[in-house]
Image (spheres, helix red, strand yellow):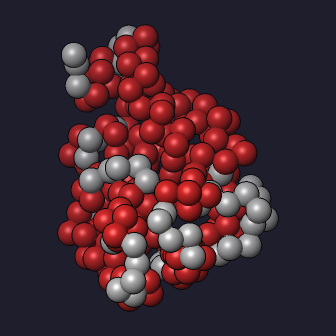
Amino acid sequence: MATDEEVLARSGTDASAFEPLVERHSRALHGYFARRAPGAADDLLAEAWLRAYAGRGTYDPARGPVRAWLFGVARNVLAAHWRGQERPAAAAALAGEASSDPWHAVDRRLDAAAVAPLMRRTLAELPAVERELLLLIAWEQLSPTEAAAVVGVPAGTARSRLHRARTRLRAALGPSAPLSLTGDLV
């Protein structure tokens, strides 16, 4: 089976060669959108694939794997979507202000549902890049290096920001936080 990098390179001369990337990564990208903009996930996914296909010649392997590049495209599509709205629904949800809360799926998996409001508040208070790094790693299962490529910071910077974010979460949640929570995010 060809690597993502090989598939993307072939798609420059053979448009149908791009299809395996769609098959391999659609589920993960849809999950990324569904957790951040639930009502628009399908449309955002379609837009991300259109932009990725149109921009496939801009991929630079020196900046990270294709998967990280695709999440970077997805992040840009989501940012454009949010700019078109008065206030991003996900930002309001993270602040605990919206009824379409992307944390409902996470809340159901937590052993102690009482931690969820504090978690939302703490995440909302994190700087945007720290929050995005943490969520890319926890929700999207990206490595810190891949998440760094998505947000456009060096890997070492991403690791230090991730450490700061985890430290803030640990401090806010305290020693009584459930193990499943601390294992998944912090």
When the figure is inspected, residue 118 is found, relative to residue 48, above or below; the finding is below
- Left or right: where does residue 6 sit relative to residue 12? left
When the figure is inspected, residue 5 is found, relative to residue 170, above or below; the finding is above
Name the residue: 25% across, 46% down: 64
Among the 4 quarters of the image, the one containing residue 134? bottom left
Q: In the rendering, at what x and y percent does residue 138 appear? A: 39, 58
Name the residue: 44% across, 61% down: 135
Number of marks drawn: 0
Q: In the rendering, at what x and y percent does residue 97 appear? A: 74, 73
- Left or right: where does residue 105 sit relative to residue 110? right
Q: In the rendering, at what x and y percent does residue 179 appear? A: 34, 70
Q: Confirm whether residue 15 shows in the render.
A: yes
Q: Confirm whether residue 80 shows in the render.
A: no
Name the residue: 67% across, 60% down: 101
- Left or right: where does residue 75 sit relative to residue 5? right
Q: Quadrant of the N terminus?
A: top left
| Along the line of sight, the residue nearer the viewer: 171 or 143 | 171
